[in-house]
Each structure stands twice: as structure tokens, then as C-alpha cells.
Amino acid sequence: MVGKKVALSAAAGQSAGAGTLAKLNEVLGFGKTELLPTDKQVGVALAPEAWGHRHAHPVR
């Protein structure tokens, strides 16, 4: 299975940091996220094994 990715816009050109990652982990219910910074967005890689978690609801 391939990992899922979500793109987040960085507000006012500011990069997302550890606070954003912590909030994502809290909301998503698992701690397998990783920030992948780009010029204007932050990609969040979600580990494939995390999608089997009982609280995970992948978009189809």
C-alpha cells in the first residue's frame, strides 16, 4: 500500500511547524505523520500502516 499525502496551505507564507504536526496527530488519532516542506505548501505523509487504525478514515 502506498502512503497517503495531504497538502496544507501555509498561512500568509509562513511554514507550518511542530505545533501543526502535533495538532494533526491529535486530530487524526495516530502519530505517523511527517512534515514535508515545499515552497508554498506543507505535505503531510501518512504512513500506510496508520490507515488500518480504527480511527482512520481514508478518503476514497
Image: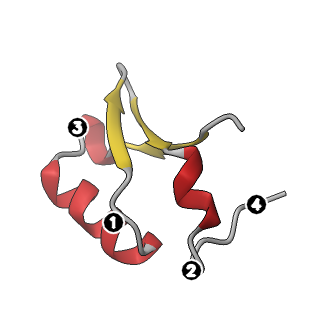
Q: Element at badge 3? A: loop
Residue drawn at 68 percent across, 34 percent down: 2
Toward the viewer: 15 or 25?
25
Q: CA distance from mark 3 to mark 4?
A: 25 Å
Residue 36: x and y in percent read: 35, 29
Q: Which residue is mark 1?
A: 25
Q: Earlier in the sequence, mark 3 or mark 4?
A: 3
The kind of residue tagged 3 is: Ser
Q: CA distance from mark 2 to mark 4?
A: 13 Å
| Mark whose residue sits in front, 1 or 3 | 1
Residue 37: x and y in percent read: 32, 27
Crowding near pointer 2: few (<14 within 10 Å), some, many (20+)? few
Q: Which residue is mark 3?
A: 15
Residue drawn at 61 percent across, 60 percent down: 51
**Tags 4 and 1 touching, CB below 8 Å:** no
The kind of residue tagged 2 is: His
| Mark whose residue sits in front, 2 or 4 | 2
Q: CA distance from mark 1 to mark 3?
A: 17 Å
**Tags 2 and 1 touching, CB below 8 Å:** no
Q: Which residue is mark 4?
A: 59
Residue 59: x and y in percent read: 76, 60
Q: Which residue is mark 2?
A: 55
Q: Earlier in the sequence, mark 1 or mark 3?
A: 3
